[in-house]
Amino acid sequence: MTGYTPNEKLQLCALQHCWLKDQELSPREPVLPPPKLRPVASFWEHFLQPGSVAAADFQAVQMKPKVFPGVRILETGEIIPPMEEEPTGHH
């Protein structure tokens, strides 16, 4: 007798279906180890993490507003004069 019986064919089909379903990846897969960082990259990676001393210092720095000619300084009321033109003579 050659070949599979109808019952064996059903079992093989079911096994193949289960095997194919097991090959599908879940949203959590693949699970990869975190990448290894070189020392300098590792330093910068952790430099401004929340809770670090550098992050606290960085958060305390405030940017000064840009000042252009004609802008009024709020604290003093002074108006920034226009820039003087450079002399056109040769150096």
Image (spheres, rainbow, N blue to C red):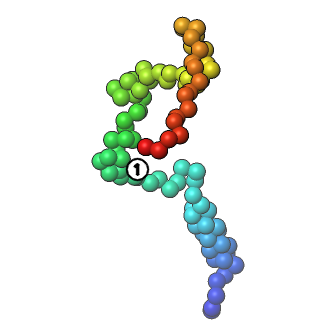
Up the image or down, 90 lies above or below 24; here it is above
In screen coordinates, is 54 left or right of 62?
A: left
Q: Nearer the viewer, residue 19 or 35?
A: 35
- On the question of residue 8 being in view, the answer is yes
Q: Residue 4, position in %: x, y?
A: 64, 83
- On the question of residue 52 being in view, the answer is no
Furthest residue toward right: 6
Q: Secondary structure at mark 1?
A: loop
Residue at position x 37%, y 37% in the image? 46
Badge 1: residue crowd in 10 Å (few <14, some 14–19, many ≥20): few
In screen coordinates, is 51 left or right of 29?
A: left
Furthest residue toward top: 76
Q: Which residue, given by chain and number where applicable, does mark 1 sit on? A: 34
Q: Residue 73, position in %: x, y?
A: 57, 13
Q: Residue 25, position in %: x, y?
A: 57, 58
Q: Nearer the viewer, residue 16 or 49?
A: 49
Q: Nearer the viewer, residue 37 or 73?
A: 73
Q: Quadrant of residue 82?
A: top right
Is the C terminus in the top left, top right, bottom left or bottom right quadrant?
Answer: top left
Furthest residue toward bottom: 1
Residue at position x 63%, y 92% in the image? 1
Q: Which residue type carries mark 1?
A: Pro
Residue at position x 50%, y 21% in the image? 64
Q: Residue 5, position in %: x, y?
A: 66, 81
In screen coordinates, is 90 left or right of 73?
A: left
Furthest residue toward front: 89
Q: Nearer the viewer, residue 18 or 48?
A: 48
